[in-house]
Image (cartoon, rainbow, N blue to C red):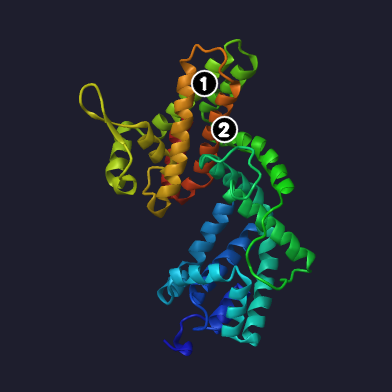
Amino acid sequence: MDRNSFPVDPAELESALAGELVRARHKLPGQLLLAGICELLIVACKAFSAPEVQDVAEAFDEAVQKKSSLLEIFEQHDDPERMVRFLKRLQTPAGMRFAEKLLGSATAHRLRRAAEKDLRIATPAIRKAMPRMMRVAYALDLCSAVPVSAPFQSETPALSALVGIAGWLDVFEDNDCSFTSGALGLPSPDSLRMAAVVRTLQTEVPRQALQRLEAVQSPLTRKLRGAYEALELSSDGISQAANSAVELVDRLFRNAFTNAQVLDWVSANATSFEHDELIRPSRDGTDLPTKRAEALCFISGGQNPGEAAPLHSAIADALVRARRTLEKVKHSDDETTPATSVQEALSLVEAAIVVAFSFTWLSIEQEKRDDLLQRLSAA
């Protein structure tokens, strides 16, 4: 298809970078699809920057609806894999030099100026969304068996990436909102900044988990509060806290989806988790879902996880691992059991709640998500 027959007018795009990428067609791998993504992000950022808009998912959904036909056009004319490979290459100085040589200095200069213009628009929205994104990232890292206090990038990849973005935006703004020369890769956050962020999130994630349950008026908030009160006040606090936490997990699973619904979900999605034990026999020989199946169905919101199956599996692992620890403590007569074992398990449960409510469930259709939240409110 030649340039003149391409059915998108660059002047009608809200993203300056998207417009330049369309004008410079057939020069960079995956650039049309990248243009669509840039347009989507700028539209979402403009919506989310409004003071009255507080839900980043709502802003993004509106942007997707507004630009869905445009994204389809770009996707028809480009290859996502080529785009990903090229973006990875741009993260090195050699990759940047290659791109500038391929484009020519004039086009490369226009793209750089357009990217700066877009980033000036996007920065307020990114700053506004950053606290929520950091809570989810920290929770994801916890569910991936990352040490709670780990301050280093290799141990907290999701959180480190966001702290790196925050630092990169600081540099961008310090340079009068212009790019410095070199690669587009994110800097590694320093350990002091990471440690400060982690300390904040260690209290923010539990608070967010409680707020999410309170928002749907779930009686399960009593179980979560009760676990902490038992640790602080009861003479048999560790065992009682573990008991409350086990009940919290079991009732989360049970009220979100019945056994029959979980079995139906397993039947429909078994190929995504083919190496997992998802069904067990009951005493009368009928099938029952395993705790892992319940955890997977809960995290997936009863939907097909698709390419997110490995992520959902890691979160389910964390939930099942936490429940197993709590079950052992619940039935233990060992008075030397440290309270930290219950606290760490509770941290995983809280992290999984935050990830489900704030991340994995966002892809569920609104009506189905409302039904799920209604069931949890009756827990």
Give the residue at x 41% y 45%: 368
Q: Position of residue 100 (x, y in %)?
A: 61, 81
Report the side of 117 relative to 267 (left or right): right
**In the foreground, 268 or 171:** 171
Quadrant for residue 96, please give it.
Answer: bottom right
Give the residue at x 48% y 30%: 322
Q: Position of residue 276 (x, y in %)?
A: 33, 40
Whether residue 50 is visible to the viewer of this picture, yes or no, is no
Q: Residue furthest left?
A: 285
Using the image, determine if residue 322 lies above or below residue 57. Answer: above
Q: SS class of the residue under badge 1? A: helix
Q: Where the C terminus falls, by quadrant?
A: top left
Q: Where the N terminus falls, by quadrant?
A: bottom left
Q: Please name the residue that numbered disc 1 is placed on.
A: 242
**In the foreground, 322 or 58:** 322
Image disc number at residue 329: none
Q: Earlier in the sequence, mark 2 or mark 1?
A: 1
Using the image, determine if residue 139 lies above or below residue 321. Answer: below
**In the foreground, 251 or 375:** 251
Q: Amino acid at mark 1?
A: Ala
Label pair 2/1, CB-CB below 8 angstroms: no
Q: Amino acid at mark 2?
A: Ser
Image disc number at residue 347: 2
